[in-house]
Structures are given as C-alpha cells and as structure tokens.
Amino acid sequence: MLENLEVLPPDPLLGLMAAFAQDPNPQKIDLGVGIYQDNTGQTPVMGAVLEAEARLLASEGSKRYLPPAGDPAFTSGMLALVLGEGAAGQFGERVRVVQTPGGCGALRIGAEVIARSRPGARVWVSDPTWPNHVPLLGGAGLQLQTYPYYDFAHHRLDFDAMFAALGEATAGDVVLLHGCCHNPSGADLSLQQWQVLTELCEQKGFTPMVDVAYQGLGQGLEADAAGWRWMAERVPEILIASSCSKNFGLYRERTGALLAVARDGRAAQAVHSQALSAARQIYSMPPSHGALAAGMILQDADLGDTWRHELAQMRERIASVRRGVAQSLGSDFQFIVREAGMFSFLGIRAEQVKRLREEFGIYMAESTRINLAGLNDGNLEYFCTAMNTVLNE
Ligand code: PLP
Ligand code: TYF
C-alpha cells in the first residue's frame, strides 16, 4: 500500500524557509514566508498575548475539549472584530461564527460547506492568488477559475478587467476576495471598488467569500474592514474566513474563525450545522490555546488596548519599510508605497531572484513576492544595494 505513493515536493514557501535556515551567510535576509518580523528581525510573542497566556496559565483548570463551534468569548469577539462592534445586533440570527484551526481551517470548512450545498461549485479566485487557495478550496471538490486582478506590467490592480470577468459569475458561483493586504501582490480594492463589487454581487447573485488574513496590517483594524463590511451589510449571504495568525502573531496556535451571514436564521443554522459536521469529518474540535488568548484580548478593554497599540506599531513599521525601499530603489519602485500589508511583487527577472539568493543570501518567492517585514534598519541598505547591483548589471 504505502510503497505505491509518490514522494511530493514541499510547499515552495516552506521549502524556501528551510533553505534560508541552512544558509551560513551572516547577512542573509528572509523575505519569503509571510511572518511578521520586528526591527531586529525577530518575531516575538505580542505583549498582549503573553499577558493573556499568563492569565490562562493561572486560571485554566482543565484541558477538556472546547465545544465544536469553539470558545464563545473568542467567536463573539471575532464577530465584533471582523463585522464591527454592532454586528451581533445588526445581523441577529443571520450570522454564525465557528472557530477553526487558523484561517486555513476556515477556508477549508467554508469550502466544504459550499460543496455540500453545491458539489463542484465554481469559485473565482484572483490571478494571482495565494497558492494555498488551490488545495484548500480545490481539495473540497470546488472548481477554481481565475479572474484578472494584478497588472504586472503596471504594478497595479486592474479593476476594469476584474469587474469585466466577474460579470460572468452567476448565482451558485463563489467569488473569493482578499479582505485586505492582498497576498501575494499587496494591491487592494478601494472602498469604492468594494461598493461596485457589492452591486455586481447583488445583480449577478454570486456568493462572496472573503479571506481576511491581515486585518489591521493595512490601514488599520476598522479601515481594513470597511470594504467587506459594506458588502456584508448589503448582500444576502457571505462567508468570511478570518485568521489570527498575523494580527495576533498566533501562527502556530492555529487560530481562526469562519463567519457566515445567511439569508435568514434557518439558513444560518443550516450553515452552522454543516460547518460543524464538516469539522467532525476532519478534526472534530478546534485547538484551544490561541483562541482562549485571543478571546481574552478581544473581551478585555486593557488587553485590547495593548494589542491594538502593538498591532499599530507593526503596521506602521511595515509602512515605513515600504517608504524606505521605495526611496532607495527609485522611481521604478514607487508602487511599493501604494500597496498594503506585508507583500509586494518586485517584478524582477528570475535570474535576478537567483542572483539575490546565491550571491547575497536574499531569499524571496520565485514569483518575486517579498515580505517587507523581513527588512529593518539593519539590513535595508544591504538589500537595496544588492537590488541595485542585480538591476544594473
Ligand atoms: N489566507 C491568506 C491569504 C494567507 O496569507 C494566510 C496565511 O498566512 C491564510 C489565509 C491563513 O493562515 P493561517 O491558517 O495560518 O491562519
Ligand atoms: O503566504 C505566506 O507566506 C503566508 C504563510 O503553506 C503561509 O500565508 C505560507 C505557506 C503555507 C501556509 C502559510
């Protein structure tokens, strides 16, 4: 049996992370996997999380299973975070939240729910999109189709092309949108473009699914949410896959939530029960630690303030790296300051990516996506000098 299996290559980004770890170059820079790093290149546990963990350690008397839908403090906190303070009252029985293992778990459970309603449904994803959308959604049997999104030649979102393509989407289709800080391009929809897509959704009847992995890392917790909240308030149904990996720094604790707004209370209850049934087919109960910590932060005014302050510092640091890179690399790279979140495409050639890695120890995805959070006061100049070298030779 098992000897019949092929050996598969690792996830390219995680493979890149392993190659970086082995590189002896003391000046090496990791611009690969999307993990936030501070100005010293570290990814420390956030202060609010440390405090919540200390309180949990002192108070958590049991490791009994969480309920299948997760910790209620966490799920109600996520509802307010993602859909706004008034969401519980505003959406009432139309909204349900299920805690999931990370944003990946939310995407997969969302995909399973869609597949149960409409096997093989078509999901429109941006070109390009996060490569893991393919196994996460395709693995549930959904059929992926791309819509144009990023215009590589002009380093910007091509909204007209996106809008034209999505004109073909129909009722029964799902359109996957990145909530903010588009991965991999950093090019986001404006609020006005969200409004136009909301109208399109109302006209065509497709179901939007929003992947929210970077709330708070673009323009701010509330500003980043404005587009999908606008949409959620108007369309009959929407799924939102939310991750606490980046904005709470909880990566390995696998903390996330699937939010579903349905047409009415009965439909919401059906989605909820199908999501729990899908979870039961895969893992039954979600992991607890990260969600208990995030839930405590979301419910406690002081911890919440500490967290929002730390998150703002992360966001502002990334924005300042963006300004620094654009300034040092000159006029061809001004698009970097117009983009949001951790990522941008440098748009350089494959052999330049290779040279940066081999000669300078600078690691980035083959797509030329860089994680700007890998840059800091100590290595920004080295990076820009290396870039100018490979660009000008
Ligand atoms: N969606 C996007 C676009 C991401 O970049 C990520 C990752 O980091 C996720 C979802 C989900 O991440 P996680 O499962 O670690 O919460
Ligand atoms: O795109 C990224 O770098 C992040 C982290 O299998 C990530 O989203 C990368 C690969 C993966 C899971 C998460």
Image (cartoon, helix red, strand yellow):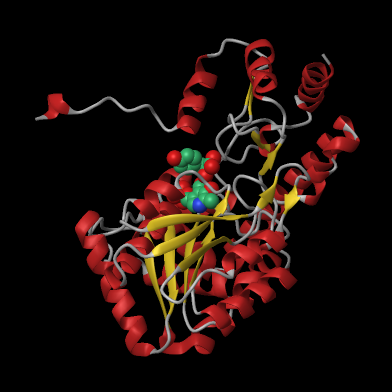
On-image quarter of the N terminus:
top left
Q: How many marks?
A: 0
Find residue 317 and report its horizontal and vertical position in percent: 75, 44
Residue 58 visible, this angle: no
On-image quarter of the C terminus:
top right
Find residue 17 and report its horizontal and vertical position in percent: 51, 27
Relative to 304, is 66 on the left or the right? left
Relative to 79, is 163 on the left or the right? right
Q: Give the residue displayed 76% in from the left and 45% down from the top.
A: 155
Residue 69 or residue 202, whichever sits in front:
202
Find residue 50 and report its horizontal and vertical position in percent: 52, 48
Vertical placement of residue 277 versus 63, above or below: below
Relative to 370, is 24 on the left or the right? left
Q: Give the residue displayed 38% in from the left and 64% down from the top.
A: 110
Residue occupying the far left of the picture = 1
Find residue 258 and report its horizontal and vertical position in percent: 42, 66
Vertical placement of residue 131 versus 286, above or below: above
Q: Give the residue displayed 62% in from the left and 28% down from the top.
A: 364
Vertical placement of residue 269 versus 136, above or below: below
* Residue 281, image quadrant: bottom left
Residue 388 visible, this angle: yes
